[in-house]
Amino acid sequence: MVSTDCQVNSEMPAHRYEQLVQSVVDYAIYMLDTTGHIASWNAGAQRIKGYSADEVVGRHFSLFFTPEDCAEGKPEQLLRQALEHGVSRHEGWRQRKDGTRFWALVALDVVRDDQGQIVGLAKVTRDITDRRESAMQLDAVRAQLFEAQKLEALGQLAGGLAHDFNNLLTIILSSARLALAAPDPERAQRMLHNILEAGQRGTDLTRQLLSFARHRKLEVTCIEPAKLIDATHGLLVHALPSSITLDTRVQPDLPNIEVDAGQLQMVLLNLLFNARDAIAEEGHIALTVEAVLLTGEVDGLHGRFVCFDVQDSGEGIAADVLPRIFEPFFTTKPFGKGTGLGLSQVHGFARQSGGAVSVHSELGGGTRMRLYLPVHSSQPGFKP
Ligand SMILES: Nc1ncnc2c1ncn2[C@@H]1O[C@H](COP(=O)(O)OP(=O)(O)O)[C@@H](O)[C@H]1O
Ligand SMILES: [Mg+2]
């Protein structure tokens, strides 16, 4: 049977529209006149803000702003922006009738009549306090995970460093003894030089370790890849057994990238530790850093990227394991050796930074992991 309801008379659309707006309870939808005074009110507005229509119609919409925002002139700014550009968007605290606050996502759009004259503004407000809290909790968990991973990495590095510090101390002690017993001043001088050099190397090592340990906040800054590689390389060589050679190549004049330096260093250590773990006895790891131009071949990315390429001659990854390696807690390593969080962190970091990570691996054929991070937007002189 065909319904006749669809034969719309000229009154219906406005009426239906009014019904629709009134039935929406998750969004506050209301009209303002061009001076910012409230002209209409819906059920969602009442539910979210706590005022009934007769309490607010005719009042200025700055009523919902916090005193701080009012003092800064936020309501007027939003109104002016909407009137000038046709639209304004804002996220921030708003105040309910009972004084409690909620985090609002606000859109203000001008409404024009048939002649194009502005007759008012449509305001849509959504309470996204829950979403904001989840996002903040997620950030807190991410920061905790980062801290936990950092401690693990520091533990791994400390083993190698302790060994190297011992070597440096041996040089210092034996040179000092020889200097004391040296009959001629020239020999004593040479010994003192050895002591100085070993002391300096020790200082450099501690500085690098401390700067890694100290990265606290997740803070995005503009960084020079070569400098970061230098610091990471300095730490890493001590965590590798002498049976593994590390070959680091960094393209000169690399463009800068915009990431959290501490996180990137962690991510690189994760990739390099994985490469180390994959090499049973002897082998090599190549770390190459270069600028590349992507045209959709990696995760559909386009543009200029810095590629951190870690290639190892290790055992490789079996085809049935490969799809799972980026899953959190997935590990093939024995208990106490792997947490399965390294690559999920690498993946999360790459995504968050607007980049990607790719893997090529075959059982018995080694593994190649490439991390792509976008070049800082205001970067001149890029050479792919
Ligand atoms: N370079 C690599 N060579 C071989 N296997 C690797 C390599 N990198 C990662 N994997 C595999 O991916 C798994 C997950 O890695 P990851 O998330 O870093 O956790 P974990 O290192 O703690 O196991 C590893 O257990 C390993 O099986
Ligand atoms: Mg790992």
Image: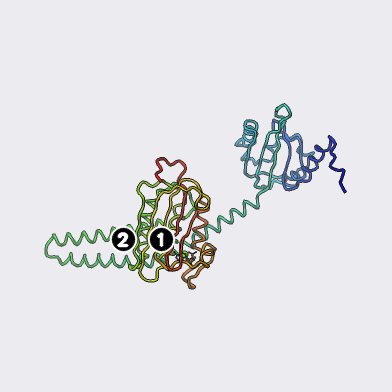
Above or below, 340 against 70 in this view is: below
Residue located farthest toward the left when viewing the structure as drawn: 184
Q: Residue at left 46%, top 60%?
A: 360
Please give left or right for residue 82 compared with residue 201 in the image: right
Q: Residues within 10 Å of mark 1 (few under 14, many from 20)?
A: many
Say if disc 2 is inside 8 Å of ligand 2.
no
Percent across and percent down for residue 232 are 38, 57
Give the amino acid at mark 1: Gln
Considering only order in the chain, which callout, 2 or 1, is on the residue closer to the N terminus? 2
Depth check, mark 1 against mark 2: the one in front is 1
Helix, strand or loop status at disc 1: strand
Question: In 3D space, how far apart are the residues under numbered discs 1 and 2 (Cα atoms)?
Answer: 29 Å
| Residue lying furthest bottom | 334
Q: Nearer the viewer, residue 132 or 61?
A: 132
Q: Residue at (24%, 59%) from the top-left corner?
A: 196
Q: Which mark is residue 311?
A: 1
**Which x, y percent locates residue 158?**
39, 65
Where does the image place residue 339, in percent across and percent down from the top left? Answer: 50, 67
Residue designated by label 2: 202
Residue 194's place in the image compared with 85, above or below, is below
